[in-house]
Image (tube, grey):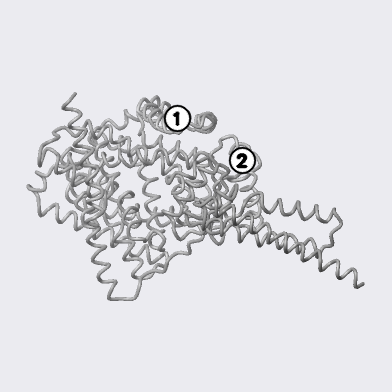
């Protein structure tokens, strides 16, 4: 037991240090994980000699990654990106796989060449997106096209995993009518369960308000999918992707994503560490020149395919080159495919290990190629222009935190003006009620950074803070101001104290929820008392101006109750004096008439 705890501690330490170190060196977290695995693996320090057990557990991280990808693939989004995803992405995978397969067939048998072409045609989603995000390039045109290609590759990886069995000598038996029927039944069970049962389960759990219960439910969803798909003899990644796709339109999508993401990131990190442990470095020592040529050939082929494809999408030369370099490496799904191929005896262990080494070394080249391109770019005009930050519907989206009576009014006005918005509310009952009327609202606690990230708050043009609970409102305001300092915040406040606390956090556009309504009631009351419209307008305007001034003055002396009381008394006297002057002027006017 003590030995296992020490191993777990060392594994966590390696994962904890690898990602920030890789980011610090500007080579990416994935490469850091792989390097950590190599260091602590059997071919270096020898702390871990059996990586298979860790790899089996860590593969759940890949399953979770596919689940999250499915959650992101809402039908509307997929349809809007159809040309880039299926056209550009499909062409890249097909052409790269064919070219690599034709090259490899000169060195190995046809089955291994076909498998190698397919496995090496994929790039690293986790690696590339992290690099582009760190470099601020996800919003460039080549960044968006890279995302579209990676999206198609993630989709294409699913049938590739399923087709591994066909490359095995026992492939025909593996695809018997009974096994095919079992697989179809498993997929149908996931679809039906996701459509009719999971939404009700999440609604029931959300109603309890227990965050740990929501996290447990999200993890349970993934684990059950793994068990079900393994029992049917199919890829767990395929089942996770389908389940995520089914839940993509659920109001709990953001909450599920926020709960799964930390575990997915950690387990995916473990997966890369385990892959690093399993890399056979003796192959590198035995065939250094052959492996170096293979890595160089892979990078050259991918760049040669991607560069002209980028030009067909009207990228300029710099943007096409950036796209090609960013996707020039092998991907993490190659490790998944090689593991499955060895298990199915579709390829030899030596071939699988060679592919893993080539993919890992190709990942190592990408950061240096991009840094070289950065150096060359500094000698030329800037590359592709930034994408408009707006969402496809128009001028950008607004995040509304809290869709109660206050937030609903804002949402209805934004909808009337065709301004896209993402509404978040922590009440499961409120979410369920509002969605019955066709409104877009998602279950999620806006005071959690993961939820704000899932709602793409960093790309929003405005943030409406309409949360009813004062403490939650302040937590959310503090989070938004800290992580999105340039995002305009439009806040609703319950009372004067709430206003002052929001002002402490740097929020400047604040409306007290009862103030305007109270002024309007006072306006109607004065009219009912027989005052003229001019008197009513003057009275309401004077009071509003003085109360706003007092609000700011009170904020400046909020720590001194005596000064606040003195301000209140002074301004009450000043207000009464102004009204007395108005009344005297009115009486003088009437006497003169």
Give the percent coordinates (x, y) of residue 259. Answer: 42, 38
Q: Is residue 547 above or below residue 180?
A: below
Q: Which residue is drawn at 30% across and 52% down?
A: 98
Q: Which residue is drawn at 40% across and 57% down?
A: 88
The image quarter in which residue 377 lies: bottom left
Give the percent coordinates (x, y) of residue 548. Answer: 62, 59
Q: Which residue lies most toward the left here?
A: 286
Q: Name the residue under label 1.
A: 213
Q: In this view, does 533 lie above or below 592?
A: above
Give the percent coordinates (x, y) of residue 186. Answer: 43, 28
Work out which quarter of the rendered image holds the N terminus and state it. Answer: top left
Work out which quarter of the rendered image holds the C terminus and state it. Answer: bottom right
Q: Is residue 477 above or below residue 158?
A: below
Q: What element carries label 2?
A: helix
So how many labels did they put on this image?
A: 2
Say if residue 197 shows up in the picture. Answer: no
Q: Horizontal placement of 340 versus 83: left or right? A: left
Q: Mark 2 points at which residue?
A: 435
Q: Which of marks 1 and 2 is nearer the N terminus?
A: 1
């Amino acid at each position: 037991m003590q030995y296992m705890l020490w191993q777990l501690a060392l594994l966590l330490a390696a994962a904890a240090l690898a990602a920030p170190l890789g980011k610090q060196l500007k080579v990416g977290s994935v490469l850091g994980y792989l390097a950590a695995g190599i260091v602590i693996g059997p071919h270096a320090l020898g702390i871990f000699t059996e990586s298979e057990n860790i790899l089996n557990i860590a593969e759940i991280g890949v399953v979770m990654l596919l689940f999250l990808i499915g959650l992101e693939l809402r039908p509307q989004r997929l349809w809007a990106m159809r040309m880039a995803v299926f056209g550009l992405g499909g062409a890249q995978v097909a052409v790269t796989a064919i070219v690599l397969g034709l090259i490899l067939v000169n060195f190995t048998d046809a089955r291994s060449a076909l498998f190698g072409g397919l496995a090496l045609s994929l790039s690293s989603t986790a690696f590339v997106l992290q690099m582009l995000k760190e470099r601020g390039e996800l919003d460039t045109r080549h960044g968006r096209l890279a995302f579209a290609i990676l999206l198609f590759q993630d989709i294409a990886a699913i049938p590739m995993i399923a087709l591994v069995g066909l490359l095995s000598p026992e492939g025909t038996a593996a695809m018997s009518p009974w096994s095919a029927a079992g697989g179809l039944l498993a997929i149908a069970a996931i679809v039906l369960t996701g459509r009719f049962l999971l939404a009700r389960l999440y609604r029931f759990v959300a109603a309890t308000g227990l965050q740990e219960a929501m996290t447990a439910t999200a993890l349970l969803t993934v684990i059950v999918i793994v068990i079900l798909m393994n029992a049917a003899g199919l890829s767990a990644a395929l089942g996770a992707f389908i389940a995520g796709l089914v839940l993509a339109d659920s109001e709990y999508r953001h909450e599920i994503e926020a709960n799964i993401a930390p575990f997915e990131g950690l387990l995916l990190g473990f997966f890369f560490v385990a892959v690093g442990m399993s890399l056979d470095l003796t192959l590198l020592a035995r065939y250094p020149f052959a492996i170096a040529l293979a890595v160089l050939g892979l990078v050259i082929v991918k760049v040669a395919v991607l560069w002209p494809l980028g030009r067909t999408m009207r990228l300029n030369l710099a943007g096409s080159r950036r796209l090609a370099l960013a996707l020039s490496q092998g991907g993490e799904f190659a490790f998944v495919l090689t593991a499955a191929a060895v298990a199915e005896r579709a390829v030899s262990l030596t071939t699988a290990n060679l592919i893993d080494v080539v993919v890992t070394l190709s990942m190592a080249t990408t950061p240096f190629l991009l840094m070289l391109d950065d150096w060359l770019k500094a000698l030329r005009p800037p590359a592709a222009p930034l994408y408009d930050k707006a969402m496809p519907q128009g001028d950008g989206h607004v995040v509304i935190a809290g869709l109660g009576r206050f937030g609903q009014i804002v949402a209805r006005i934004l909808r009337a003006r065709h301004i896209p918005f993402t509404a978040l509310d922590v009440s499961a009952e409120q979410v369920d009620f509002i969605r019955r009327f066709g409104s877009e609202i998602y279950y999620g606690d806006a005071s959690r950074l993961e939820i704000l990230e899932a709602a793409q708050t960093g790309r929003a043009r405005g943030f409406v803070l309409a949360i009813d609970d004062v403490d939650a409102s302040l937590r959310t305001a503090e989070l938004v101001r800290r992580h999105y300092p340039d995002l305009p915040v439009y806040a609703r406040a319950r009372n004067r104290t709430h206003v002052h606390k929001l002002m402490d956090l740097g929020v400047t556009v604040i409306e007290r929820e009862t103030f305007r309504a109270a002024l309007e009631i006072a306006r109607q009351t004065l009219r009912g008392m027989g005052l003229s419209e001019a008197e009513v307008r003057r009275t309401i305007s004077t009071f509003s101006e003085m109360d706003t001034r007092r609000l700011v003055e009170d904020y400046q002396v909020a720590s001194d109750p005596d000064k606040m009381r003195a301000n209140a008394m002074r301004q009450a006297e000043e207000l009464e004096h102004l009204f007395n002057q108005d009344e005297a002027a009115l009486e003088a006017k009437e006497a003169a008439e």
